[in-house]
Image (spheres, grey):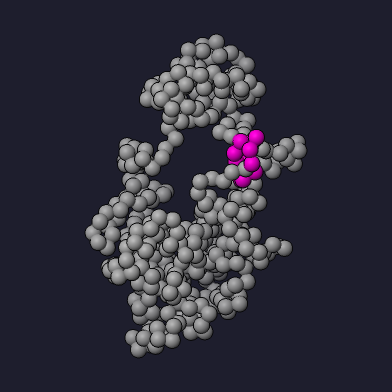
Amino acid sequence: MGKDAVYPVVSPPPFGPLAGVKVLELGTLIAGPFCTRVLAEFGAEVIKIESPGDGDPLRRWRKMLGDTSLWWLVQARNKQSITVNLKHPEGVAVVKRLISEADIVVENFRPGVLEKLGLGWDVLHAINPKLVMVRLSGFGQTGPMASQPGFGAIGESMGGLRHVTGFADRPPVKAGISIGDSIAALWGAVGALMALRHREVGGGDGQVVDVALYEAVFAMMESLVPEFDMFGFVRERTGNVMPGITPSNTYTTKDGKNLIVAANGDAIFVRLMRIIGRHDLADDTTLADNAGRDARANELYAVIGAWVAANDEATVLKLAAEAEVPASRIFSAVDMFADAQYLAREMLLSASLPDGKSLRVPGIVPKLSATPGAMTWIGSKLGEHTNLVLERLGYTQFEIDRLRSDKVI
């Protein structure tokens, strides 16, 4: 997609439960933009502030179509892009005018950066007392590490996720995606909606939603804290096995395919043993609950692994489905594009590129029955909506031209 690609002029999405909510995005890359993407998919009007010249670095991350990242086309969908130089006093003035009519502002700068620009919470709250400010950062807005840089990888490590990911005889590994950033983004969206609820129903003012990446990950760590506090138990890496929940594991079939069989429910375990032909284990009362099965985990995994290895993938999945035992191949993109469930749930949407070609992008999550989300347009070119937004703010064309010549926008 070249720099000269022509995108249609767009208006705020008129749909969804967040229609009428105005959001200003001051974020880059993953956490902040993913938070606002969720809001935009459900009808919020999101105006994304980008630096003139290069814009959000995500525009150039991973696989490119021309000079535009395919990731960008998804992450920035339904958003309006305007360019503003936040280091110029008149650029700050533009942001303040946008803040005056915004419901939510989302930012993921290092704590202190916005304050140095004259856009700290005290300033913004004075301009718009009803404003909700979502602040996503590595370590939060307070504490001894607040001013340090922190990416999702650091949050995953400090939050405990990396320590338990991988196999016991090898160093920790990462998930294949930037999961820490994405988890923090979702907490940010939840917090923003909670704050809106308080403002609109409780009659309160706006407030700050402070999300630290490491805390967002830490909040997902199941029973790690009470187990350590009560028993001194430190959860470690267990490979593909769910620790303390048996049996659930990944296996390899006779035709070399990897799949997962999750039979950790009491009745499900009995059904699996019967299709395997191990009625003795199905009827063994010591295996009737999870604690009993977990005590014999290695034995059970060997039995299931041998059965899977003796059959091809299609047979294992067919027999498991007939017995109502949860099982699945390990999906790649190839599987997703051909899967009936993905298609039935509209999890692969078609978008139109400026040249008329079609591009498949992820569908909308979650599914709301009465006010579903939607995709109105894909990520726009840099500064596409600058004139449109400034005109709505009351700037004249003469003023806009001057701001552009002064490199404010």
Left or right of 13? Residue 144 is right
Left or right of 72? Residue 131 is right
Q: Which quadrant: the N terminus?
A: bottom left
User: Any magenta on residue 165?
Assistant: yes
**Residues drawn in magenta:** 161-171
Residue pictured at 67% horizontal, 41% vertical? 224
> What secondary structure prevails in the magenta region?
loop
Residue lying furthest top: 280
Front-most of residues 153 and 180: 153
Left or right of 39? Residue 210 is right
Front-most of residues 407 and 84: 407
Q: Position of residue 331 (x, y in %)?
A: 42, 37
Q: How many marks?
A: 0
Q: Position of residue 207 (x, y in %)?
A: 57, 67
Residue pictured at 51% horizontal, 11% vertical? 279
User: Any magenta on residue 294?
Assistant: no
Residue pictured at 45% horizontal, 59% vertical? 61
